[in-house]
Each structure stands twice: as C-alpha cells, then as structure tokens.
Image (cartoon, coloured by chain):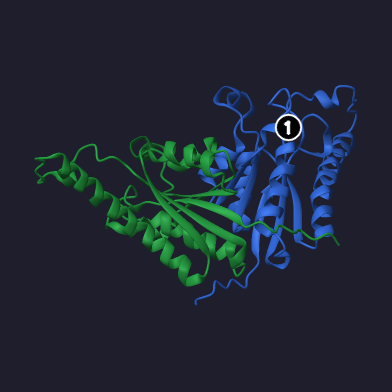
Chain colours: A blue, B green
Amino acid sequence: MEVVVESEVCRIMMGVNESTIKGYPHPSISSKGAFEWTLKKIVRSNISAFKFLFLHVQVPDEDGFDDMDSIYASPDDFKRMDRRDRIRGLHLLEFFVNRCHELGVACEAWIKKGDPKEVICHEVKRVQPDLLVVGSRGLGPFQKVFVGAVSEFCAKHAECPVLTIKRAADETPQDPVDD
Amino acid sequence: MEVVVESEVCRIMMGVNESTIKGYPHPSISSKGAFEWTLKKIVRSNISAFKFLFLHVQVPDEDGFDDMDSIYASPDDFKRMDRRDRIRGLHLLEFFVNRCHELGVACEAWIKKGDPKEVICHEVKRVQPDLLVVGSRGLGPFQKVFVGAVSEFCAKHAECPVLTIKRAADETPQDPVDD
C-alpha cells in the first residue's frame, strides 16, 4: 500500500479582518468562523503539519470618520495616527496568534494597507502559501455591489488553491452586511 | 495546552469530470490535479481522518454528436445508450476509487445527470459533506462565457466550505478550454 507522505509543513495563509460591529480587536464573525473551521476540519490533531500565515489588510480610512475630532498640527500627528491604526491591527492579529499558541500550531502574522482583495492576491504571489483561506459573509448579489467580494476575487485571481468558508446562517447578524 | 480533537471523519466531496481531450475514462487535468493536491496537502499521512465522496455529473448530450451513427428503432435502443453513458462514467469514477484504495483512504462515488453546477450544489445540500473540492481550469472572463464556471458558482452557492483548485500553468494545454 502506497502511503501519502508530505514532510513539508502545509502553509495556510488566512486573510483576517476586524468585526464591523465590535471593531478592533475583535475578529469578524466570518474570519473567526473560517479559522475555527480550518482548525477543526483540516488541522485536527495533526498540529505539526501546518503553519498559519495571518494577513490583515487595513483599508485606508477614506471618509476619515474615526478621525473626526482629531486635530493635525504637525507631521508627527499623522505618524501618531498611523501608529494607532497599526496597534489596532496588531491587537486583531494577537487574537489569532494567541489561539495558535494555545494549540501549539506554528504561525506568523503581518499587516498591510490597501484594497484587501488586491493586497491578498499580491501577498499570495510573494509568500506562495500552499492554501489561502478566506471567510465570506455569504452575501447575495445585491449586497455584494456595496461591500465588494474579497473571497470571490481571491478564488478567481489568487495563484494558489483557495478555500472559501461562508459564515453559518445562525451566526449572521440582523443586517447581513455586518460581520 | 488545548488540543484540537475531531473524532469524526472529514468528508470531502469532489466534483470530477472526464478529460475533454482524451474522453472517458480519463479524468480532466483539473479534476486529477485537484484530487492529487488534496491528498498531498490536506490528507497527507492522516489517512483514516478523511473520506472522499466523488460525484460525477454527466451532461446530457445536447448535440448528439456521439450518437451520430446510431440508429434508434426501439425503446431498448435508448436504454442501451443510457447504459453505455453510465458505464463510461463508472470508468471515470473507477480511476479515483482505485487511487483511494491504493492509498487506503475511504471513499464513495456516484453519478448524476444534469447541469454540473446545479447538481453539485443540490448534492451538497443532500449529502452535507464537510468540504467541497472543485478543480478549475482557471480561465479568464472571456473564455468563461462559453464554458460556464462550475467552480465559481459552487464557491458562491454550495452550502459548505468550497476549495477551488486551479490547474497549474504548466499543465494547461495549448487551448485552455481543453482539460
């Protein structure tokens, strides 16, 4: 009987984002769901065979809502703002890294800025993971017009196999655009 | 240290089809590639933890090209034709079942008729696998108009996580619509 042997670690890249309801450092329902599903169904007890690569893409704050009451008087103020965003993103990644650490699964995590779907595909090209996992809100075509469809774009364009994991129906908030 | 334990077998459903170049019983490049990738990267040596469910959807022969020289003189002639198609499909499934048997991975396989994307999503609803794996030719938007995009439809509509595995560039035939 031939046996499947793969000595190399399977590197699973995951795009993760913050909750639109609870904000940083809480992960979105779909990011958290996709991560837990991957642990339960793919990694299982085969802990040493996998490594997670967590990528969080921060979207530049176009409307500046969060910075409404801020006053920018010097270049340093902008640096401080950048640093604050970065720290928020780091706290999000901390959630995933802590969970991996608890379980003993190897991981790495990093932050990029830009359009999530473009940045994720670009990072896939650079990092060459074995698999990209993306959580999806599972929105219908109408809602997709507004929120964009990162998972759909990645499944089409990323240069590696892509696992799309939709949010469970019983975890969908009243407004499905929330996550 | 908490340990991920999942005693239940992870049931991986795979939509498989025949080669458009070599015909039955040869699997398409993307079906075969997706299957081998899943064995190598997900199943690995963790053989007893997974079960494959192979679904082959036969597309009703609309233009009847294959039956050009056939003469239908009685209801039995049609039954015979159906039987012949069924046998061809079975030989395709035999390829995947044999490979699983060699490796000692549990599997099941069955055939349905209809529009592959619709049938696959319907079977996901009925069978409730943990994961659906679909091979993809990775065609551009122009080519997709003609060949349909089973993987894209399934990633959107199937009621379970969907793993889309594109064909490797070095395995793409001169005409990318071939598979």
The residue at 79%/25% (across/down) is A64
Front one among B115 and A51: B115
On the image, the x and y values in percent for residue B77 come to 15, 44
Front one among B87 and A25: B87
Compared with A123, A6 (above or below) is: below
Chain ID of residue with mark 1: A
Quadrant of residue A140 in the image? top right
Front one among B145 and B67: B67
The residue at 55%/39% (across/down) is A153
Quadrant of residue A102 in the image? bottom right
- Say whether residue A12 is visible: yes
- Say whether residue A160 is visible: no
The residue at 89%/34% (across/down) is A77
Residue that label 1 marks:
A179
Q: Which amino acid does label 1 sit on?
A: Asp
Image quarter where the N terminus of chain B lies is: bottom right
On the image, the x and y values in percent for residue A46 come to 70, 65
On the image, the x and y values in percent for residue B76 come to 16, 43
A23 relative position to B106: left or right: right
On the image, the x and y values in percent for residue B52 come to 51, 57
